[in-house]
Amino acid sequence: MYRSGENYDKMAELVGQIYIDYDIHSFPIDEKEVCHKMGVCLLPYSEFPIEERELLKKKSLSGFYVPPTYNSPPMIFFNNNIDEGGSEGNMRRNIFHEIRHYVCEDTDEKTENDDLADYFGKYFLAPISYLIALNITNINQIVADFAVDYDMATYIVKNLRNRRNRYGDTLFDYEKPLLKHLLKSQYDDVICQSHK
């Protein structure tokens, strides 16, 4: 199903705001630290008895978000068994996928919400604007530097190429605060260098 580019831009802008608000500034992103800073309780399936684990997997093989209540914080349950969930990179993306559901207060399982949450999770792990600014285009470097799996790195490079084919190395206004946050004193030098 087609999604407006504006919706994806909003997800990228939201990622940037979270990086700034919670002072996230180094890669690879630590999903446990991010959840801690955001007040989200992160619960791996392996912490539950086998019977309960099976029930959790019936709800979702990869993981799910439970909204906060009066008595409990927001919670993300996730499958930390790599053999069942794919890879560590995929597990990490799933956690950020669920963070998007939390931040956007999703209350239903709409396909659009899941599509945007998938994009959000991938962008959170390796922001396209950061890759453009530092001219990172190598799949293996993305795997190593951002702790994503090869398939995800391939997807990210495909998105990067599509973006560059359409806009070159232009950075959008909503991306600049994130880059200033991540690059700090190097920002002006890196941005000037990437636009030569």
Image (cartoon, rainbow, N blue to C red):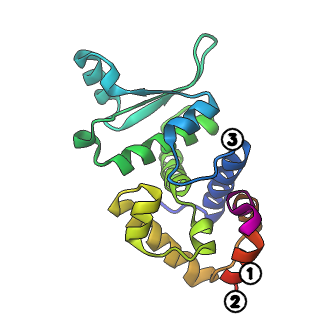
How far apart are the two marked residues, 3 and 2, measured between alpha carbons? Answer: 32 Å
For disc 2, the marked residue is 196
Q: Quick check: 40 above or below 192?
A: above
How far apart are the two marked residues, 1 and 2, measured between alpha carbons? Answer: 7 Å
Q: Quadrant of residue 107?
A: top right
For disc 1, the marked residue is 192
Location of residue 110 in the rendering, given as x and y in whole percent from the top left corner: 50, 42
Q: Quick check: 53 above or below 29?
A: above
Q: Are marks 3 and 2 in contact (CB under 8 Å)?
A: no
Magenta extent:
179-186
- The tag on residue 66 is none
Location of residue 23 in the rendering, given as x and y in whole percent from the top left corner: 69, 45
Q: As drawn, is 152 to the left or to the right of 33?
A: left
Q: Quick check: 78 above or below 168?
A: above
Q: Quadrant of residue 5?
A: bottom right
Of marks 3 and 2, which one's residue comes earlier in the chain? 3
Of marks 3 and 1, which one's residue comes earlier in the chain? 3
For disc 3, the marked residue is 22
Q: Are marks 1 and 2 in contact (CB under 8 Å)?
A: yes
